[in-house]
Structures are given as structure tokens and as C-alpha cells.
Image: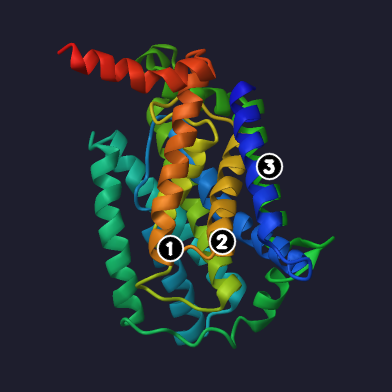
């Protein structure tokens, strides 16, 4: 609870700063764009968070998003496949990618870092091959779908409503079912989970399937959002934003910790940070620097709160380090 209170307070602070930089006339449109961005980013963050709870990691999320978007474009534009059928194919492709990743990690014993790092390169390259390094003309075929998803209900973006629906489903699964408790058990102590009779390999594969399945959904939402696919830029750094949002929201990379509400708050913080940078007219080249420093500060404060350190202890830490260094 202390963790959620801290990051929620930081989220509120960011939003107040954004309000200070936003013109009253642009307030409504800026809020709508924020909910839209949070909806798309939050979907991939939820998938990454579920995987991280089991102690796994996926560095290929951004490339999977690009690959799934390329498949969707290829089916709709080049082969005139009906959009509902293309959506089903894309979602199944995402789930299949997760199943392959999970199989390589569990049954072949490969490190998740290596497997998904290879996927990061392979799926991006496959997307470029599918699209021939061109930008397909997909805007016209999906015009009606784009109009729907770029709309709103009760002044809230459809993308955010979709995220909230997935959030409810993910929360029920992770926090109110025995399968979710298995996720936490595997992340906390995989060997103990095996001795307890849990089918560890199955649930680890399931976690990878869910992660890539959510990435496929994010790919579809990204296409409907901007009505375009670019193999060189679609999904860029999405894996980092997804993992950072999940970790910022309370997930531990060691596994066994995490809460879906925290994942949403972490995603919102990242999106608000980007918006604040734009509002403050900070150079685009400095955006990663600002986000990285802000996340590092949040991580330091979070770790200090977990250890029960006070603000006075935190501020006196540099002096203590200096004294230790001067003493040799």
C-alpha cells in the first residue's frame, strides 16, 4: 500500500504540472490524447507485468508489436482479408510467438533474456521483409475501424475503455484465481512451486503467451490509432516502456511481486512524463534523459521506503558515502 501511495502521489504531481503548462482551450484535447496513449501503452504493460510476476522477461515486445502490425497490414492490404479475420490471425500469431518463447525457456532451458533478445531482432527484420521497407496504404481499408477506436465514450477514449476491460480481466485472473496465485508462487520460488505440485512449465509458457497476446492487441490498437505501419518505427522501445511501467508500478524483476493497479499507474506516469516534456518544450533528444532520470529517482525513493529509511537518511547518504571514501 505504501508503494502505491507513493507512485500515485507522483502521478498526481505530474498531472498538476501538466495542467500548469496546458492552455485552458487545449485542456480537453490534451486529456483525450493522454487517455488514448495510456490505453495503448497500458495494454503491453499489463502483459509484461503478468510475465514479470512469474520471474520472466520479454525484450521482444516492441518487435512483436511491429511484426503483428505488419501481418495485419499484409493481410488487409495485399490479400484483402476481412478485418475481423485478420484480427483473429494477428491475435493467434501473438499467442503462438509467446508459446514458442515459453517453450524455448522452459523445455530447452534457454535464458529468457537471450531468447527474447533474439526475437527483438528477428521479428523486426521479419516485419521489414513483409512490408518491403515500405509504408502500406492501410488508412482507407480500416477507416471505419479507426473512426470507432479513435472515438470516445463518456469523454473517455475507446482505447482506455479497452485497457480497463483488460485490466479487470487481468486483475481477476492474477489476484482472485488459483492460477494467479501459481504465478506468484513460481516467481517467488520456482523450486518450491515444483515441489508443491504446480505445473511450473505450463504456467511459465502461459505467462509468455499472455505477454505476446497483449502485445498483439497493442499492435492492432496502434494501427487503428494512426492508420499506418512503419517497420522502422512501429513499436520502437515499447518493450522498455512496458517493463519500466510494470516495475515502476511495483513489479519486481526477481518475480513474485506485482499488482495490476500499480501497472496502470506506472504506465500513466510514463505517458504523463512524455506529455510534460512536450508541454515544457524540452528538446526531443533530451526526452530519454528526462524519463530515465525521473524513473531512477522514483526507484531510489521506492527502495528507500521499502527499507524504512526516512528523508533525512536519504539526504545524508551522499555525505556518508563521501566519508567512507575518504577513509579509504
Q: Name the residue under label 3.
A: 12
Report the front residue among 327 and 132: 327
**Above or below: residue 312 compared with residue 250:** above
Discs 1, 3 touching: Cβ within 8 Å: no
Mark closer to the observer (2, 1) = 2
Q: Position of residue 81 (x, y in %)?
A: 53, 80
Specify how the rendered protein is coloured: rainbow
Mark 3 closeness class: few <14, some 14–19, many ≥20 residues within 10 Å: few
Q: Please give the name of the residue rendered at 41% of the width and 84% of the height, measured from the top-left corner.
A: 135
Q: Which of marks 2 and 3 is nearer the N terminus?
A: 3
Answer yes or no: is residue 50 visible: no
Side of 86 relative to 205 (left or right):
right
**Secondary structure state at the residue bearing disc 2:** loop
Side of 256 relative to 33 (left or right):
left
Q: Name the residue under label 2.
A: 280
Q: Name the residue under label 1.
A: 235
Amino acid at each position: 500500500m505504501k508503494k502505491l501511495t507513493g507512485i500515485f502521489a507522483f502521478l498526481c504531481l505530474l498531472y498538476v504540472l501538466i495542467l500548469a503548462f496546458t492552455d485552458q482551450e487545449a485542456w480537453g484535447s490534451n486529456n483525450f490524447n493522454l487517455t488514448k496513449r495510456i490505453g495503448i501503452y497500458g495494454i503491453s504493460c499489463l502483459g509484461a507485468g503478468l510475465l514479470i510476476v512469474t520471474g520472466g522477461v520479454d525484450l521482444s515486445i516492441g518487435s512483436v508489436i511491429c511484426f503483428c502490425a505488419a501481418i495485419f497490414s499484409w493481410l488487409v492490404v495485399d490479400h484483402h482479408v476481412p478485418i475481423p479475420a485478420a484480427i483473429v490471425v494477428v491475435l493467434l500469431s501473438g499467442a503462438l510467438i509467446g508459446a514458442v518463447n515459453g517453450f524455448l525457456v522452459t523445455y530447452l532451458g534457454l535464458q529468457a533474456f537471450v531468447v527474447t533478445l533474439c526475437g527483438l531482432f528477428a521479428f523486426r527484420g521479419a516485419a521489414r521483409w513483409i512490408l518491403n521497407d515500405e509504408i502500406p496504404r492501410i488508412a482507407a481499408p480500416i477507416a471505419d475501424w479507426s473512426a470507432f477506436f479513435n472515438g470516445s465514450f463518456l469523454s473517455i477514449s475507446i482505447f482506455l475503455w479497452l485497457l480497463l476491460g483488460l485490466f479487470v480481466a487481468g486483475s481477476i485472473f492474477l489476484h482472485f484465481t488459483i492460477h494467479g496465485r501459481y504465478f506468484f508462487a513460481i516467481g517467488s520460488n520456482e523450486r518450491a512451486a515444483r515441489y508443491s505440485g504446480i505445473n511450473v512449465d505450463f504456467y511459465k509458457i502461459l505467462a509468455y503467451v499472455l505477454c505476446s497476446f497483449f502485445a498483439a492487441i497493442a499492435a492492432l490498437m496502434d494501427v487503428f490509432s494512426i492508420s499506418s505501419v512503419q517497420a522502422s518505427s512501429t513499436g520502437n522501445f515499447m518493450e522498455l516502456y512496458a517493463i519500466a511501467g510494470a516495475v515502476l508500478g511495483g513489479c519486481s524483476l526477481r518475480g513474485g511481486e506485482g499488482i495490476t493497479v500499480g501497472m496502470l499507474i506506472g504506465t500513466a506516469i510514463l505517458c504523463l512524463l512524455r506529455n510534460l516534456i512536450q508541454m515544457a518544450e524540452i528538446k526531443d533528444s533530451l526526452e530519454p534523459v528526462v524519463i530515465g532520470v525521473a524513473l531512477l529517482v522514483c526507484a531510489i525513493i521506492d527502495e528507500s521506503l521499502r527499507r524504512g529509511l526516512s528523508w533525512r537518511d536519504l539526504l545524508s547518504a551522499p555525505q556518508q558515502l563521501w566519508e567512507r571514501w575518504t577513509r579509504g
